[in-house]
Amino acid sequence: MKTIYLAGGCFWGVEEYFQRTKGILDTSVGYVNSKKENPTYEEVCSGRTKAAEGVSLSYDENIISLKEILNHFYRIIDPFSLNRQKMDIGTQYRTGLYYTNEEEKLEFEQFLKEKQKLEKRKIVIEVEPLENFYLGEEYHQRYLQKNPNGYCHIRLPEKE
């Protein structure tokens, strides 16, 4: 089992999308690279923490590869929007890939380099070291499963 950390706008939809993806074993939503220890949702929304809404994905690399996860991620976000996804605007909604080792960093960078060759506009997905990941409040975990009609900025696949 391996774990990847990413940010793709509002974490509710990103988590639910990957909950429905074969090979993803577990997900958690939280705050990535916060300047404040254990921030609250309200503090993250204020922009003062510099945190992004993020998702931790644990996956079985025998079922789904890191590159496949990155392809899914790229499909569900707008890689050209800085600090926003659809109607969600603010630095907490930026897109990012957060590495925990040099191998991951190189894979993230190579993936985005390949994607950029196919695009005319500049991709603005940040690639940064994972400094921290603080779990979001319990009501945010599996939010769209608890609230099936809740807001989601991405198109979700049918449940398997």
Image: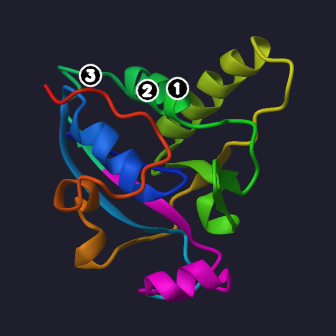
Tell how many labels: 3
Q: Residue at x 64, y 31 (%)?
A: 109
Q: Of helix, strand and loop, which one carries label 3? A: loop
Q: Residue at x 19, y 28 (%)?
A: 23
Residue 11, quarter of the rendered image: bottom left
Residue identified by numbered label 1 = 75
| Along the line of sight, the residue nearer the viewer: 83 or 113 | 83
The amino acid type found where label 2 is placed reads His
Q: Give neighbour class at mark 3: few <14, some 14-19, many 20+ (Cα, 10 Å).
A: some
Q: Give neighbour class at mark 2: few <14, some 14-19, many 20+ (Cα, 10 Å).
A: some
- What percent of the width, then of the height, locates residue 64? 26, 22
The reply to whether discs 2 and 1 touch (Cβ–Cβ < 8 Å) is: yes
Mark 1 or mark 3, whichever is nearer to me? 1
- For the residues marked 2 and 1, what is the alpha-carbon distance in whole angstroms? 5 Å
The reply to whether discs 3 and 2 touch (Cβ–Cβ < 8 Å) is: no
Q: Residue at x 58, y 79 (%)?
A: 45
Vertical side of 46 occupied by 158: above or below: above
The reply to whether discs 1 and 3 touch (Cβ–Cβ < 8 Å) is: no
Residue 151: numbered disc: none
The region drawn magenta spans: 38-56
| Along the line of sight, the residue nearer the viewer: 156 or 17 | 156
The disc, 1 or 3, on the residue closer to the chain's N-terminal end is 3
Residue 72: numbered disc: 2
- For the residues marked 3 and 2, what is the alpha-carbon distance in whole angstroms? 11 Å
Vertical side of 99 occupied by 66: above or below: above
Residue 64: numbered disc: 3
Residue 150, quarter of the rendered image: bottom left
